[in-house]
Amino acid sequence: MHNRRLLEHFDWWIFLAVVMLMVIGFINLDSAGTATGYPFQWRQFWWYIIGIIAMLGLAFFLDYRKLTTYFVGIYISIVSVLVLVLCVGKTVGGSKRWLSLGFMNFQPSELTKLVMVIVLSSYFYHNDRPQYCLKDLLVPGAMTLVPVYLIYRQPDLGTALFLVIIFVSLVYMARIKWTSFLISLGSVLLLLPFAWERLRPYQKGRVLSFLFPERDPLGVGYHVLQSKIAIGSGQIWGKGFMAGTQAHLSFLPEVHTDFVFSMWCEEWGFVGAMLLIGIYVLILYRGFLIASQTRERFGAFLAFGVTCMLFWQVVINIGMVMGLMPVVGIPLPLISYGGSSVLTTLSGIGILLNIRSRRFMFQKERG
Amino acid sequence: MKRTEKAVKFRLKTIWHIKRFNQEDLEANRQRCKWAITLLFVSMSIFCVRLCYLQIVMGRYFEERSKNNRIRSVRIQAPRGDILDRTGRLLAGIRPCFNVCIIREDVENMEALLTRLYPLLGETEAEIRTRLHVGSTEPSYIPVIIKRGINWKTLSMIEARLFYLPGVSIEVTPAREYPYGSVAPHLLGYLGEISEQELRSGRYKNRYPGDLVGKCGIEARFEPELAGKDGQQKLEVDARGRLVRLIDKRPAVSGDNLYLTIDLDLQEACEEAMKGKSGAIVAMDPQTGQILAMVSSPGFDLNDFVKGITKTQWKALNNPVTRPLLNRAFQCSYAPGSTFKIVTAAAALEEGIVTKNTILNCGSSYRLGRRVFRDWSWRGHGETNLHKALVESCDTYFYQVGLKLGIRKIARYARAFGLGSKTGIDLPDENPGLVATPGWKRRRYHEPWQKGETLITAIGQGFTLVTPLQMARLISAVANGGRLYRPIYMEKILAPDGHCVVSFHSEVMGTLPVSRSHLRTIRLGLLGAVQEDKGTGKQCRVSGVHVAGKTGTAQVIGQARRRRNEKDMPFKFRDHAWFVAYAPAERPELAVAVLVEHGGHGGSVAAPIARKVFERWFQIQSPRPLIRSPKITNNIRGGDSHA
């Protein structure tokens, strides 16, 4: 029936870009896997397959509008999963972030990013106001803070703060009163010193080493310095596939997750970096375009939220490895190794494609 | 078609109550997304600029940084050149030195490791901790040397336990080895860690703190030749400093090998003869000026320096009284005593004061004005000619001759015999000695020259100071017919591949201003001093070889304070014993100067030492035709005495 029209309105640009990202991600992880002696690329490959199935499934076999009706259920289940993580989660490197499913480990905090986009979009859809003041934001704010706190307790400050960023992005979309904005900004600034006291030493170190990079070149700042060396030494054409000395001689930390972009830049140079950034720009531009062209409120919020989710991840990760932002554990969508991240990203893009494909449903009325 | 769509829309509206944007909301929504897109492009542009900066502007810099990260240049220390004697026996070589190191990065539990390590090394805890502390400024993958030069027993014990000592490793560096023991320590010299001052002086190329360099003797003089050229290894390492692969290697070129003119057997004999005594022996080939042996006593043990010298050892080496580090062969000067009579005799003959037949009456003393100058023999010598005066070392004879000569002529001849100036041996800090003149005394003491001083100068007392090396050269010149050679101790320098870099030739620096016949007269006198029964040096007789020599007893304090019995005097006031000699008298091939500080009489102390040296030399050289036939002896003696 209208499946043909769905396919007609399918955004092939985004699909193409996603496939290219996956190819780049696989190639890069192939090198990273050799560097670390762990076959990341094949595990990632299967996640890509699962992710693509999820993406296409979400794009074609579900009307995104159904999500508004389920949002309370979705929210409750993600919160309970996060509580479950704190109780029975698997501890790796000092933090409890993973749920062991026997054959694989899953990181619910990744999925929470997408879930919060859906939940907040639904909330703003259901509570439509021309402008929001502080009082109106109490409920969505509280809804955000529950998973933020749960994730902060894992501890995973990066992802926790990322949820706040998603909240702020959607509030921007929903339009807030200037006075409310100024008041909240002021209170955040006031609370900042207290929050600083609550941070763990390594978290403080990361922030300090970002603000004063020369403070401790062998400590926290070492990673960023090595990352800059890796990127810079790639020069225009890069050192070549599998030839990145910084990554392969393990000067670069976390070469398969957080610092995956440094490795790509080292091996493929400025040209490769521009290609990767170009692909992201393509996806994000199309994403914002979908949000701006959607003719109904929920779809616009959802598209904007998903695009923002991708945008901020890209900005924070690339900014971090280039020494423009403090070190936080935010993966680069589809390039960093990690099944949860791949699945979340591809599901998000599936929703995006879904919204785009169903644009036609509202066109007729207008004309 | 239209109908179905309407139906779908209806369903959507009814089921989900979808609210569409009105025009105003749509416009506002678009505006927001536009801003978001602007933010997207701005942030991505910032990234592009940053990438440009990192990869293109700073690309070369970061490339260099990444290379420095992974490539370690490791210096391969060049083995030091060998030092060999004239027959090619190894005096100073190279052996592997095993050092115990700790790589702090690989240590799991430092305390447990140290408690296991102390008993193996036999070092105190404090010492090891100090070294670890000093090394802690380096990156943790750099090995810290805990103990240098462990012996085989310790090495095998540690090697066997390495598995239980994580982080401990054995490092091998080249170190000096002395296969024949500590032979000729003063001449060879020792190695020490390069000082900051030396590093800054710029004389040492490619040396780094902690490197060993020659501090004195040959090791210092031929440092550039011995040092060789260090090699370099370029290693690729990972972030933990572990070796990944070898990128490039430039092997080290070992130092040149030095062949000395020293004869190991003779040197050992000399050292043996000087054992327990303080003084020096210089043995020289009179025909070439090559030094065959050079001993200064007390000596020191070169092996102590290899192990690393302790504070107490260093203190003992710098004892202000014994001063073992001083090379007494040419860094100290002494009054020559009666050995100087050779110079006086030559001067007297040349200046026509006496002929060999001139007879002077020699009692037990000589009176000049109000002063009485005594002979060493209280009996006196009676009627004495030059030959007898040399044989019996008659002081009174030379008082009279010296008075007639005058100090200026004596000084001139002393200079001509190579005294009062450096011999030109190629080693630092040579003492030039002193030949006193009235001018010198006026400058030094602001006093006029006394005639009595001329007298005692003529017999080698007074102001004159000579080094054993100068005396060895002097006696060599007498032996070889008047040629003063520059003393040389190096024969050749060979590169590691065997080709000759430098060979050293003997060099005549001057000739004695003495005619052949006069020289022959003196030589006969010297021969008599050993071979005749009344000769003062008869204790130096060697069976089968004719030795010619001259004794000397240099007074350290004035006559007035002397005691009759030498043994009663404090050690530091006892006389220096001298003996200079050469052999065989007919065709000299070895000249020796012996000095024993505060030894007593030259004839009784120094001459026996010289005998041991000669005995050793002629034993080495045998089988040789021993010159014993009276015919030849007569020929020499008769030829001179009747001519």
Image (spheres, coloured by chain):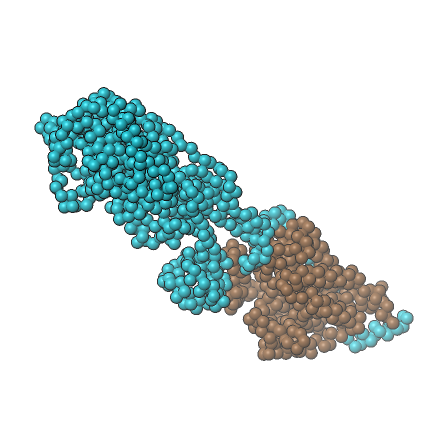
Instruction: Please state which of residues A32 and B358 is positioned toward the viewer in this rendering.
Output: B358
Q: In the image as oriented, which residue stretches furthest toward the left?
A: B370
Q: Residue B298, relative to residue A284: is it above or below?
A: above
The quadrant of the picture occupied by the C terminus of chain B is top left
Q: How many marks?
A: 0
Q: Residue B26, relative to residue B274: is it above or below?
A: below
The quadrant of the picture occupied by the N terminus of chain B is bottom right
Could you say where residue A19 lies in the image, as x and y percent from the top left? 76, 62
Could you say where residue A256 lies in the image, as x and y percent from the top left? 64, 63
**Colour given to chain A in the rendered image:** brown
User: Is residue B5 left or right of B222 when viewed as pictured?
Assistant: right
Could you say where residue A79 lies in the image, as x and y percent from the top left? 63, 76
Q: Residue B590, relative to residue A30: is it above or below?
A: above
Q: Residue at x 58, y 67 (%)?
A: A157
User: Is residue B395 left or right of A206 when viewed as pictured?
Assistant: left
Q: Which chain is cyan?
A: B
Q: Residue at x 73, y 63 (%)?
A: A22
Instruction: Please state which of residues B439 and A18 is positioned toward the viewer in this rendering.
Output: B439
User: Is residue B445 left or right of B515 when viewed as pictured?
Assistant: left
Based on the displayed image, in which of its 4 quarters is residue B354 positioned? top left
Q: Residue B613, relative to residue A309: is it above or below?
A: above
Q: Is residue B331 visible?
A: no
Q: Residue at x 39, y 66 (%)?
A: B119
Q: Is residue A167 visible?
A: yes
User: Is residue A180 left or right of B15 when viewed as pictured?
Assistant: left
Instruction: Please state which of residues B491 and B353 is positioned toward the viewer in this rendering.
Output: B353
Instruction: Please state which of residues B211 and A262 is positioned toward the viewer in this rendering.
Output: B211
